[in-house]
Image: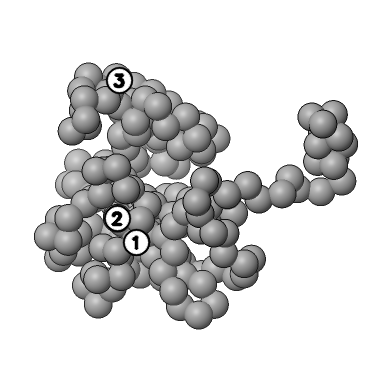
Amino acid sequence: MQFIDSIKNLFGPPARVAEPGVKVAPPGEYVIRPLTKRHLREVTLLNAECFPNGDSYTRHTLDFLLSQPTTLSYRIVTEDNDTVGFAFVMVNETGTAHLTTIGISPKHRRRGLAKRLLVHVENALRARSINTLVLEVRVKNTAAQELYRQKGFYVVQRLNKYYTDGEDCFLMMKAIY
């Protein structure tokens, strides 16, 4: 069976495999737009959907991020203007930025949306002469780590017991030119 799947993959992309219990959304077009306080309720619900195991930010934290002049925030939307992904980046005066969170609805994953958001964030930072982007990622989240490596990030440190459940994270960094 694996051999047949390999042959199929030569002639087209592999079929979209959903996470258990997730109904995959139909294919469509997506656009990146600014994320503002007007979208707080929508992004709060999406954040909880993206991070169901306690990693989601509270409404209060998201509201704080949206109110900071040093935060860049973006959403990725469907043709119907439904938000299916988001990214928050905090910029500091030293020329570095911190990708605070990035999430894609489980129904819309494996479509390159997180990669598109990362490219958009990097372009926005480049336009502001920000030259370094850092982030944290769970040690067990190998899919996200692979995406970040593909985009030029590298691990600079392992932070022990970083998450509330005691899991470690990798601090990753990328120089932006």
**Residue 4 in view (yes/no):** yes
Q: Give the residue number, with chain letter if any, for mark 1.
A: 46
Q: CA distance from mark 1 to mark 2?
A: 5 Å
Q: Residue at x 82, y 31 (%)?
A: 1
Q: Are marks 1 and 2 in contact (CB under 8 Å)?
A: yes
**Circles 1 and 3 in contact, beta carbons < 8 Å:** no
Please report whichever mark, 1 or 3, sits nearer to the chain's N-terminal start: 1
Q: Position of residue 15 (x, y in %)?
A: 71, 49
Say the numbered circle drawn on residue 157.
Answer: 3
Q: Residue at x 31, y 56 (%)?
A: 47
In the image, residue 46 above or below residue 39: above
Residue under the point 18% across and 33% down: 164
**Which amino acid is tagged 3?**
Gln
Secondary structure found at label 3: strand
Q: Residues within 10 Å of mark 2 (few under 14, many from 20)?
A: some
Q: Nearer the viewer, residue 133 or 12?
A: 12
